[in-house]
Image (spheres, grey):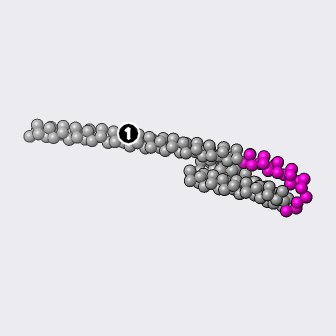
Amino acid sequence: MKRSRLNLFKVTSMSISVLGIIMILATVALFAYIGITSLSSSISSDVGSSSAYDQLSVLKSNYNALDGQFNSVKINVDNSNNKNAKNAFITAKLELVKANSTISDVDSALASGQSKSEVQNRINAAQTQLSAAQASLSNVRGML
């Protein structure tokens, strides 16, 4: 009888020890999984923001080129006595200022770490605004 109690105690102690080790291993595996998941999501978001930074640099480049075109057209508008062309140029310049503002919005969204969809929405808005400024400039050139 004493031997069977001793064997039962040994088996119970061994079972509890094995279950404890399994619980510790499961906890370590869970924390490792959470760490790896958060690391991989931060890496993938960095890759996505890298693409957004590339798009931002293209937007800035397009803006600078368009601004240069505006400066050359401004000389022609100032030399002409066409009041309609001057009013259209002012409207077109306003569109260019709006484009610069939307590009700044993209830059601030990237700097503040906003979601990829929000950054993409702002990039699309900036591209649309640049296109509107280009169309306004073309309209002014048509009046000269």
Question: 71 left or right of 10?
Answer: right
- Residue at (22%, 38%) from the top-left corner? 14
Numbered disc 1: secondary structure: helix
Residue 85 drawn at (x, y percent): 84, 59
User: In the displayed structure, would residue 37 be above or below residue 88?
Assistant: above
- Residue at (44%, 40%) from the top-left corner? 36
Residue 97 drawn at (x, y percent): 76, 54
Residue 135 seen in the figure: yes
Quadrant of res 35: top left
List the residue tagged with mark 1. Answer: 28
Q: Amino acid at mark 1?
A: Val
Q: Which residues are magenta?
A: 63-84
- Residue at (59%, 52%) from the top-left corner? 120
- Taking depth in this image into account, of 67 and 24 the one nearest to the observer is 67
Question: 25 left or right of 1?
Answer: right
Q: Work out which quarter of the rendered image holds the N terminus and state it.
A: top left
Q: Is 64 contained in the magenta span? A: yes
Mostly what secondary structure, the magenta segment? helix
Q: Is 45 contained in the magenta span? A: no
- Taking depth in this image into account, of 70 and 80 the one nearest to the observer is 80
Question: 66 left or right of 78?
Answer: left
Residue 136 drawn at (x, y percent): 75, 58
